[in-house]
Image (cartoon, rainbow, N blue to C red):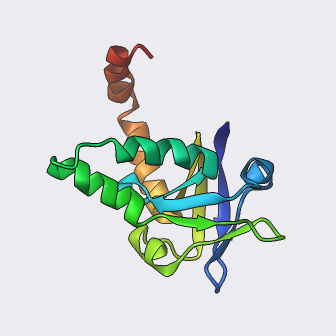
Amino acid sequence: MFIGQYNHTIDEKGRMSIPAKYRRDLQQGVVVTRGLDHCLFVYPKSEWEVMAEKLSRLPVSQKKSRAFARLMLAGAMDADLDGQGRVMLPEYLRQYASVKKHVIVAGLYNRLEIWDEDAWREYRTKTELESDDIAESMNDLDI
């Protein structure tokens, strides 16, 4: 299970160090793809297979289903951690998420999210201000 928030940097070659706490769980490789809210999603390969299977079952006849599958699948990239626990983030994904040098890696149960540090701070501040309304709406989800 991935939880927590970590500050990291992207080097000049586009590599980012995965938090040491998560490396063992990602030894079989990862899939990095476009996420929602303009961040990047990082899935262990086993979790990605579950997600990709769900995406493949979306109705191709529905425009929004096609768009979502394209967002997630066409932007996806297989990657392995190097000997120092780093993963390469290709330019097209860094551009999508507007990540520069300083990033936040957030653990969200079955995936990691990579955010530009400034974008994360803005998102987190807005979400914290709306936390009461957000919590109230979760009642319908039995949370």
In the depicted view, which residue is nearer to us: 6 or 18? Answer: 18
In the depicted view, which residue is nearer to us: 24 or 142? Answer: 24
Which quarter of the figure is the C terminus placed in?
top left
The residue lying at 38 percent from left, 65 percent from top is 74
Asked if residue 17 lies left or right of residue 33, the reply is right
The residue lying at 48 percent from left, 74 percent from top is 94
State the image coordinates of residue 53 (x, y, percent, origin top left): 44, 44
**Quarter holding residue 17:** bottom right
State the image coordinates of residue 58 (x, y, percent, origin top left): 29, 43
Which quarter of the figure is the N terminus placed in?
top right
State the image coordinates of residue 43 (x, y, percent, origin top left): 58, 51
- Is residue 101 something that shows in the picture? yes
Asked if residue 77 lies left or right of residue 128, the reply is right
Asked if residue 131 lies left or right of residue 29, the reply is left
**Relative vertical location of residue 70 with respect to residue 99 in this rendering, above or below:** above
The residue lying at 58 percent from left, 76 percent from top is 101
The residue lying at 48 percent from left, 55 percent from top is 121
